[in-house]
Image: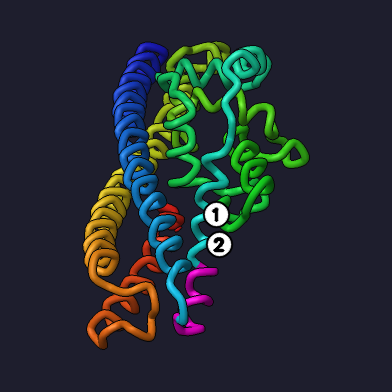
């Protein structure tokens, strides 16, 4: 029986290791996808600000424009606030050593990413410890929420808070990495348990990780669609802006009917893009 259970344990742990490695590999690809999405969103953000300035310089525009431009500004400020988080490497290295789970994260095969990847993850998946989307906040509140999220939640909720978030900017990755599985593979967690119990636990972990793999595969598809949609909006809006900036007067009353239709579309498309750059995956 011991031999049978030993084989059962070995097979279960081998399966867990294979699934954990597949999940970690997929997770790194999701990180790369998130960085690509962030790059597109930064381009979009720059263009949105350009359009915002252009519309604000026009005179005698309809009141409806003013309302939409204000909404555009709110959206762009939400996005920009998260990117203003500063990364202090020395402070981060000091704090990382004292964070429970940091060693496990490293053991799970999570590469050390810089602040760009961390912000990509925060803007793609981020939620504040209150459950509120980071992009729904603004200014210092958004910055603090992003840091707390990266640190595993607010101190009051049992997380590491903003300090931990600062430290973990270099260990960014979707929540859930195959941490439990990696700990099991190491053997230390279950060193004193019987073979059968280890096998059962490993099988349970394998099932959970396989569920996460399915989720991440869906996430990759969603991020790819967001990148494509953002890119299409950027190209379309840039074309509209270039046409109007080269041919239209600075007074809306002097616009031709065609130009009025064109700038109306430009405002609406820019508003849509400002919402799109704050759209978070899995919501």
Q: Quadrant of residue 84?
A: top right
Find residue 204 and report its image quarter.
Answer: top left
Disc 2 element: helix
Up the image or down, 133 lies above or below 190; here it is below
The picture places residue 25, in percent across and down from the top left corner, at 30, 27
Q: Is residue 176 above or below residue 124?
A: above
Mark 2 and 1 residues: CB-CB less than 8 Å, in contact?
Answer: yes
Closer to the camera in the image, 120 or 222: 120
* Residue at 34% from the left image edge and 29% from the top image edge: 28
Q: Which residue is mark 2?
A: 74
**Which residue lies under the disc numbered 1?**
77
Q: Residue at x 50, y 23 (%)?
A: 170
**In the image shown, does 8 or 24 lie closer to the viewer?**
24
Q: In the rendered view, how is the structure colored? A: rainbow
- Residue at the spot 52% in from the left edge and 62% down from the top edge: 73
> Which of the pair 2/119 is nearer the observer?
119
Other-residue count near label 2 (Cα within 10 Å), few / some / many at <14 / 14–19 / ≥20: some
As drawn, the label of residue 281 is none
**Residue 188 placement (x, y as % from top left):** 54, 11
Stretch in magenta: 61-71
Crowding at mark 1 (Cα within 10 Å: few <14, some 14-19, many 20+): some
Q: Residue at x 23, y 83 (%)?
A: 258
State the predominant SS element of the stretch in magenta.
Answer: helix
Q: Quadrant of residue 74?
A: bottom right
For residue 128: magenta? no
The residue tagged with tag 1: helix, strand or loop?
Answer: helix
Q: Quadrant of the N terminus?
A: top left
Could you tell me residue 103's position as x and y percent?
55, 15
């Amino acid at each position: 029986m011991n031999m049978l259970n030993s084989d059962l344990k070995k097979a279960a742990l081998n399966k867990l290791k294979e699934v954990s490695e597949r999940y970690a590999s997929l997770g790194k690809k999701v990180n790369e996808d998130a960085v690509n999405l962030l790059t597109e969103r930064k381009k979009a953000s720059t263009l949105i600000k350009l359009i915002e300035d252009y519309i604000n310089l026009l005179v005698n525009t309809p009141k409806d424009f003013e309302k939409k431009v204000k909404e555009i500004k709110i959206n762009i400020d939400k996005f920009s606030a998260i990117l203003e988080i500063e990364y202090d490497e020395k402070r981060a290295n000091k704090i990382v050593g004292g964070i429970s789970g940091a060693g496990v994260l490293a053991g799970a095969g999570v590469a050390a990413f810089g602040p760009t990847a961390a912000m990509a993850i925060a803007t793609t998946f981020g939620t504040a410890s209150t459950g509120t989307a980071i992009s729904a906040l603004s200014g210092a509140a958004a910055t603090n929420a992003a840091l707390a999220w990266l640190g595993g939640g607010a101190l009051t909720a049992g997380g590491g808070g903003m300090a931990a978030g600062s430290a973990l900017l270099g260990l960014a990755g979707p929540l859930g990495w195959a941490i439990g599985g990696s700990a099991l593979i190491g053997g230390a967690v279950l060193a004193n348990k019987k073979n059968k119990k280890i096998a059962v636990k490993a099988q349970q972990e394998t099932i959970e990780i396989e569920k996460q793999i399915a989720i991440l595969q869906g996430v990759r598809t969603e991020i790819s669609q967001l990148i494509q949609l953002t890119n299409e909006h950027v190209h379309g809006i840039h074309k509209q802006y270039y046409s109007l900036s080269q041919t239209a007067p600075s007074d809306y009353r002097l616009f031709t009917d065609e130009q009025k239709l064109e700038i109306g579309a430009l405002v609406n498309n820019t508003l849509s893009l400002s919402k799109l750059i704050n759209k978070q995956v899995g919501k």
